Amino acid sequence: MTAPKKLNDVKFSVTYKGQFDLSHLYAMIHDWFRTYGWKSMNGDSDAERSEILYRQNELTGGLREHRIWWRLKRTPETGDEYEFVMNLNLTTSAISKQEIVYAGKKIQADSGEIKIDVTCSMKFLPDETWKDSFHKWMLGMYKGWKRNQILGTWNMMFVECYNLQAHFKKYLNLRQFIPVSEVELFHPSKEYSRNAK
């Protein structure tokens, strides 16, 4: 059996313009990292340490912009020969505070544009540890032997990264393709009950 060809990175981007709560979105991202076992690049399980950049700029007219970058990794359940790596960049522009009605109450919300860029990749660790060793000649055979596990692990990463995209889209009330039910909505649902008269 032949070794799988180079597996592509999983990339997605979510852009939204409107009202949202940046602090709640920020907390949701940290909760998602914790729930799925993502850690900082040095192995620390605290999601705060995975944040390599947090910059807030004050603009004229009371507007703000943000640049927040996270760099994370995770060892999947299939074994310690693999490592998932995630780069998440969150950018906001022209953010202002507005008073809106949410769940029957007036609240202060952020209004502006937000863009989230995510890149997920998978490392097969023997690629790195064997490349300069005596076992280098066996690497192709070993990857062929592990082909199904490598592809299955990559599929796990693919699903997990798009699950994160679905969380963002559910929170921001955008069209999504993966059903997500446990995310608290920022925008109230406009669905009617089946029993409504």
Image (spheres, rainbow, N blue to C red):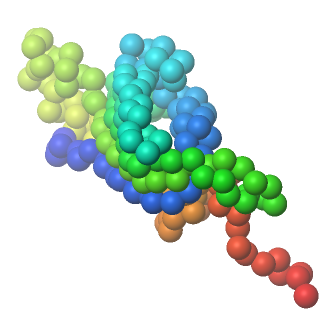
Q: Nearer the viewer, residue 122 or 143?
A: 122
Q: Considering only vertical position in the picture, is 44 above or below 63? A: above
For image coordinates 82% across by 77% down, the residue present is 193
Q: Nearer the viewer, residue 149 or 118?
A: 118
**Residue farthest toward the front in the current orientation of the protein:** 61
Q: Where is residue 29 in the image (x, y as percent from the top left)?
A: 54, 38
Location of the C terminus (image quadrant): bottom right
Quadrant in the rendering for residue 149: top left
For image coordinates 70% across by 67% down, the residue present is 189
Q: Where is residue 60 in the image (x, y as percent from the top left)?
A: 39, 42
Q: Considering only vertical position in the picture, is 120 above or below 48? A: below
In this rendering, position of residue 22 left or right of residue 131: right
In this rendering, position of residue 41 left or right of residue 4: right
Location of the N terminus (image quadrant): top left
Tell me if residue 137 can be seen. yes
Q: Considering only vertical position in the picture, is 66 above or below 17? A: above
In this rendering, position of residue 83 left or right of residue 167: left
